[in-house]
């Protein structure tokens, strides 16, 4: 983008969004008042919908009344209402009829269709413009071109005819012509059904554009996968850059041929042996992505591949169901709960996992504590249990700042040890760091009730000797019950098994094919063997059968 065009964009965003940003920050000074007013608006707007009548929304006068009137809901509790309202047009959950459904499979389970009303869609667009203002104010992300990875806007139609797909893709398509001209990827790329062809097309478009200053996607593992595609077949990728030709399976507009750019990248490839993002986009100023939870592992592997000084901007806690936080200060990555559009309730983590605990509002949360989230939205989710755990990491005004910690299902319990995903992430990262190695490119730890033990599968180079003992030791330090069960012999010794190169990518591809959103893909690093839909044991056995003496380590 020329200097003049960028100044014009920045001025336009500031004029339109700076006042809204100030209003949001004022709301953060009084979170209790803001949240109560929002709840009253949501309930009043939907009091005559079927759900509102069933739960007496018209008579609710307080947060306490609401909690007494409406029980906590899961998607399965709402599924019948969602499907009925879409098929018949009945006002089952909201007075506004949804115009779109955000499809997600979640981490486990059948596809879910999250309703989006006209008001909800308009709010998404406002949030996107506010984020663009913050990124422009606090970074150079939008100075040049932007490579943003989203899902397909429309993946199909519901039984009643409403479209479903990725809301991020819908927003991508709805941008003004000027804004869309700044994107590297045409929206049709997200609609390529063939997984390999889609990534190859993204790689070719990205390689061909030297002026990228910002890249954005929900999960940083997407960028690692993109770089793998480039380096696994650099000759094919650079030939496509030079010719502007894509495989037949990549049914999207072809990029312009750029032979000089291809030759430039060939020289960089010859000098380094593998291309990093610093080689491809030396002007890259910012990466917008998730940084918390399991994404921290992928981010740790991505950061060394970036140009020096590239800024990492937290995307914010978000899901298919609702936008949980907005990054209101990209320099500090301060993420404010979306308190003017989502009514939040929380339950302290340990108490909720023990089967109890009281519900809390935003003002009642404590620094450093972890909580389960329950959301009420204007799109028809009421006291919705998303099974997410968030952590309080500071305050913005008088409102707690939140970060995603992990999925609530990331807990296993074979003999009473209650291992959490966060404990697993910390132990594996620290164990490999102690041996002077980065975290594995991919890993997953599976609990097996039949053998009363855990197996860590890792896609990594180098011998595994000593890793099992170190991970086991760190888990024992972090979890007294794990330590007790290991000492008593009720838990078998931890095993570590190596996976063949690319196994993590194959797992991801399988999960995307089964319905998970590719751009938002995140796997649980801790699962039960019985719930894991991929045979990692067979993959590890195939590597061992090839005579790899370092394919297994045991405590």
Image: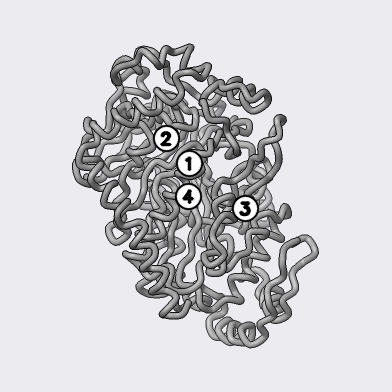
Q: Is residue 353 above or below residue 198?
A: above
Element type at mark 2: strand
Residue 231's quadrant in the figure?
Answer: bottom right
Element type at mark 4: helix
* Element marked by disc 1: loop
Q: Which residue does the numbered mark 2 point to in the structure image?
A: 388
Q: Say which of 4 and 229 sits in front.
A: 4
- Say whether residue 19 is left or right of residue 511: left
Looking at the picture, how far across and down is residue 176, in whole percent? Answer: 54, 61
Q: Secondary structure at mark 3?
A: helix
> Along the horizontal axis of the image, is 80 left or right of 69?
right
Residue 361 picture location, percent across and down: 27, 29
In the picture, the quarter occupied by the C terminus is top left
CB-based contact (under 8 Å), mark 1 and mark 2: yes
**In the rendered image, which residue does mark 4 sit on?**
125
The CA distance from mark 4 to mark 1 is 16 Å
| Residue at numbered disc 1 | 319
Name the quadrant containing residue 271. bottom right
Q: Nearer the viewer, mark 4 or mark 1?
A: 4
Q: Specify which label sits upstream in the sequence, 3 or 1.
A: 1
Q: Which residue is mark 3?
A: 503
Inter-mark Cα distance, 1 to 2: 10 Å
Q: Nearer the viewer, mark 3 or mark 4?
A: 4
Q: In this rendering, is residue 139 above or below 411?
A: below
> Mark 3 near mark 2, Cβ–Cβ under 8 Å?
no
Tell me where residue 344 appears, x and y as whole percent. 35, 31
Tell me which numbered mark, 1 or 2, is placed earlier along the sequence. Answer: 1
């Amino acid at each position: 983008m020329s200097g003049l065009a960028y100044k014009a964009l920045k001025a336009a965003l500031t004029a339109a969004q700076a006042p809204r940003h100030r209003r949001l920050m004022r709301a953060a000074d009084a979170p209790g008042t803001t949240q109560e007013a929002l709840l009253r608006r949501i309930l009043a707007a939907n009091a005559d919908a079927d759900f509102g009548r069933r739960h007496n929304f018209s008579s609710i006068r307080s947060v306490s009344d609401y909690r007494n009137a409406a029980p906590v809901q899961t998607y399965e509790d709402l599924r019948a209402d969602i499907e009925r309202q879409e098929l018949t047009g009945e006002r089952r959950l909201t007075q506004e009829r949804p115009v779109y459904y955000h499809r997600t499979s979640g981490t486990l389970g059948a596809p879910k269709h999250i309703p989006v009303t006209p008001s909800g869609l308009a709010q998404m667009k406002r949030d996107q413009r506010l984020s663009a203002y913050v990124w422009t104010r606090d970074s150079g992300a939008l100075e040049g071109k932007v490579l943003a990875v989203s899902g397909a806007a429309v993946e199909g139609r519901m039984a009643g005819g409403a479209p479903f797909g990725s809301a991020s893709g819908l927003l991508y398509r709805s941008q003004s012509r000027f804004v869309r001209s700044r994107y590297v990827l045409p929206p049709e790329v997200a609609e390529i059904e063939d997984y390999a062809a889609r990534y190859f097309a993204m790689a070719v478009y990205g390689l061909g554009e030297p002026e990228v200053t910002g890249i954005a996607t929900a999960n940083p593992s997407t960028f690692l996968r993109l770089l793998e595609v480039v380096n696994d077949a650099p000759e094919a990728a650079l030939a496509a850059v030079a010719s502007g030709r894509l495989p037949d399976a990549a049914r999207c507009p072809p990029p312009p041929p750029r032979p000089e750019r291809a030759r430039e990248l060939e020289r960089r490839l010859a000098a380094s042996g593998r291309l990093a993002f610093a080689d491809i986009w030396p002007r890259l100023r910012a990466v917008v992505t998730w940084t918390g939870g399991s994404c921290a592992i992928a981010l740790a592997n991505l950061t060394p591949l970036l140009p020096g000084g590239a800024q990492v901007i937290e995307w914010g806690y978000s899901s298919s169901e609702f936008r949980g936080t907005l990054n209101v200060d990209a320099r500090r990555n301060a993420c404010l709960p979306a308190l003017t559009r989502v009514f939040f309730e929380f339950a302290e983590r340990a108490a909720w996992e023990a089967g109890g605990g009281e519900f809390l509002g935003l003002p009642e949360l404590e620094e450093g504590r972890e909580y389960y989230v329950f959301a009420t939205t204007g799109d028809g989710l009421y006291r919705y249990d998303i099974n997410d755990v968030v952590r309080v990491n500071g305050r913005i005004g008088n409102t707690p700042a939140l970060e995603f910690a992990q999925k609530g299902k990331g807990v296993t319990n074979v003999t009473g040890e209650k291992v959490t995903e966060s404990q697993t992430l910390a132990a594996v990262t620290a164990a490999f760091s102690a041996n002077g190695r980065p975290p594995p490119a991919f890993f997953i730890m599976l609990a097996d009730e039949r053998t009363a033990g855990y197996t860590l599968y890792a896609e990594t180079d180098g011998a595994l000797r000593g890793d099992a003992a170190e991970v086991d030791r760190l888990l024992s330090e972090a979890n007294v019950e794990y330590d007790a069960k290991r000492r008593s012999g009720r838990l078998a010794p931890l095993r570590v098994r190596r996976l063949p190169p690319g196994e993590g990518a194959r797992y991801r591809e399988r999960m995307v094919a089964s319905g998970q959103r590719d751009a938002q893909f995140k796997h649980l690093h801790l699962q039960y063997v019985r719930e894991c839909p991929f045979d990692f044991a067979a993959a590890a056995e195939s590597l061992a059968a090839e005579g790899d003496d370092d394919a297994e380590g045991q405590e």
